[in-house]
Amino acid sequence: MTTQHPLPPIVCGVDDGYARPLRTLMHTIAAAHPTAVGELRLIVLDQQIGDANRWAILRTAERIGLHTELRQAPLTDPRYPVSDWVSGAVYVRLAIPEVIPEERRVLYLDADTMVLGDLRPLLRQSLDGRPIGAVRDPQNPVIGRGIQLPGWDQLGVPYGRDYFNSGVMLIDLDRCRRLGVFERSRQFLSEHPDKVRFWDQDALNWAVNDNWQRLERRWNTFAMSPQAARPGFIHYAEADSPLARLLEDEQTAALVHFAGPDKPWQDAYPAGPLRDTYRLFHDYADGSAA
């Protein structure tokens, strides 16, 4: 009889601003694994989460049966650029190797994702010796034809190179440590803050230097239909990532990612099936804190 090795943990990093979305994500994980949630583990990188939110996260974990551990994460270097809708917590994932030294691989998820399918095939997927597995960014898929990595040519990055989204990453930590991926990412942020548009994502794409495993799009499907419903919406990546295909991807998504400043828990978010599904879990998560 062969011994089944434990699955790699799921990792999220949040501050108080994303504590409730994290609990929503936890509920979607449980719903997508009705008989297998006990096989999964969640490690939360805690960037100054308040006591009330910490308690609510652990209470949610207890109720849904998801083994969850909170670990203190270092504060973000104040030199790293942020924006009006992204706080320094966006960089907390760069501390994964230090905060989780005992793991060989992890699955990182942004807190604004929604799990709709079984994650176990992804957790077991081979990376063929590459440090990171990710999905090409649907809205900025290639360097030089998007707004990512301004100054890409000065950095020696080839025009037209694929660019991944860091909201969902299967990470081989052993390989990343050997290659210095996270150290190189932090170095990039410190030395080139003027060439950062998408925060840690730009830094990781530069540090990995195209040595990443392409994952199926279903593992990081952007919620494009609500964006496309907005008046005046323009999909600038049509040539490399056709909008019609991205809309079709929503029907087969295992992980939906609400990337960008507009979030489904906000009052102004466009109505539609994705918003309605998300809010069912979000409202339930809010009640589970009681």
Image: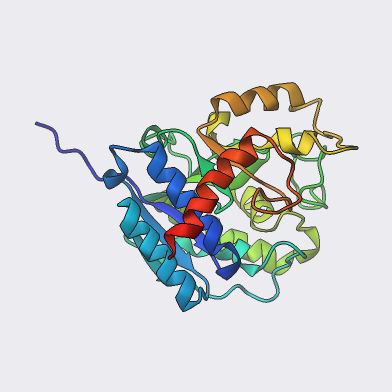
Whether residue 179 is visible, yes or no, is no
Which quadrant would residue 164 be assigned to in this image?
top right
Q: Is residue 226 above or below residue 245?
A: below
Residue most toward the right?
232
Residue 211 horizontal/vertical position (percent)? 56, 40
Task: Tell me what residue is drawn at x 44 percent, y 51 percent.
Answer: 26
Task: Tell me what residue is drawn at x 59 percent, y 60 percent.
Answer: 184
State which quarter of the image contains the C terminus.
bottom left
Task: From the viewer's perspective, tell me whether residue 5 is left or right of residue 266.
Answer: left
What coloring was used for the rendering?
rainbow
Whether residue 22 is visible, yes or no, is yes
The one of 23 and 44 positioned closer to us in this rendering: 23
Q: Is residue 130 above or below residue 197?
A: above
Residue 222 horizontal/vertical position (percent)? 65, 37
Task: From the viewer's perspective, tell me whether residue 90 is left or right of residue 28.
Answer: right
Residue 117 horizontal/vertical position (percent)? 45, 33
Task: Tell me what residue is drawn at x 64 percent, y 69 percent.
Answer: 88
Task: From the viewer's perspective, tell me whether residue 191 is left or right of residue 123.
Answer: right
The one of 166 and 59 positioned closer to us in this rendering: 59
User: How many marks do you count on the picture?
Assistant: 0
Task: From the viewer's perspective, tell me whether residue 176 is left or right of residue 124.
Answer: right
State which quarter of the image contains the N terminus.
top left
Residue 248 horizontal/vertical position (percent)? 65, 22
Q: Is residue 16 above or below residue 279?
A: below
The one of 214 and 21 positioned closer to us in this rendering: 21
The one of 127 and 68 positioned closer to us in this rendering: 68
